[in-house]
Amino acid sequence: MKQTGLIILLCMVVSVLFGIVHNQISARVSIEYFTVGHSRIIDSVSPVLLGIAWGVKSTWWVGLCLGILLSLAARTGNWPVRSAASLVKPMLTLVLFCAASSASFGIAGYLLSARGMISVCRYMIPSISPDRHAAFVSALWMHTASYTAAAMGGLILSVRTFAGRLSAGKQG
């Protein structure tokens, strides 16, 4: 039971740390993403404080869900089990995948918006200065990509973890 808790804790800590770092970057790309595009959770427009607050609020539950799924994949059944320590490197690989996805889509969103091929939602146009639209779209695409990559990557990591245990059980 101790390892199950450690796997869940690992996933939550990695997710929250990634969220804070990610939001430190995206808050500098577009502070409007947090001040206009989201409800106010703290009384500040500081990119640092918004990045920390939203980094924790928006990712702890992702880590919890991934931790539960990954701990089930790593520990359930009669096959050889995986420890939390054995999942650190795969979790860091997942973080790099999420970061690369976020950066790629953030750049793509910015370029497409700057060229007028896409724009911010109609109801947000009056709230965001026209010269900030491309940055807002960039931050939006960064966040959408990182959540999508985390969901897909987390599922793949869990399936691979379980499949690895099945394979090791057949060999042993």
Image: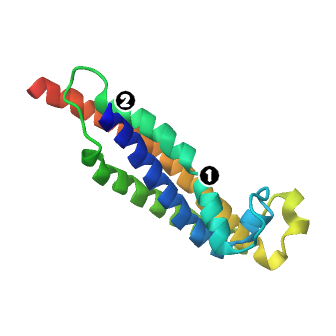
User: Residue placed farthest to the right in the image?
Assistant: 126
Q: Position of residue 97 (x, y in %)?
A: 42, 57
- Tell which circle, 2 or 1, labels the residue nearer the N-terminal end: 1
Total labels: the figure holds 2
Q: CA distance from mark 2 to mark 1?
A: 23 Å
Q: Which residue is the site of mark 1?
A: 58
Is 32 in front, or is 52? 52
Residue neighbourhood size for the residue with mark 1, other residues' Cα within 10 Å, grouped as few (<14), some (14–19), many (≥20): some
Is 139 in front, or is 39? 39
Picture disc at residue 9: none
Residue 75 is left or right of residue 57, and the answer is left
- The three-letter code of the residue at mark 2 reads Leu
Taking the image as drawn, is residue 53 in sight?
yes
Find residue 119 and report its image quarter.
Answer: bottom right
Q: Which residue is the site of mark 2?
A: 72
State whether residue 94 is above or below residue 1. Answer: below
Instruction: Residue at 45%, 53% (x, y): give it.
Output: 13
Instruction: Residue at 79%, 79% (x, y): give it.
Output: 131
Residue 145 is left or right of residue 163, and the answer is right
Q: Position of residue 149 (x, y in %)?
A: 49, 50
- The three-letter code of the residue at mark 1 reads Ser
Find residue 42 and report its image quarter.
Answer: bottom right
Residue 47 is left or right of residue 121, and the answer is left
Is 102 in front, or is 117? 102
Find residue 113 and report its image quarter.
Answer: bottom right
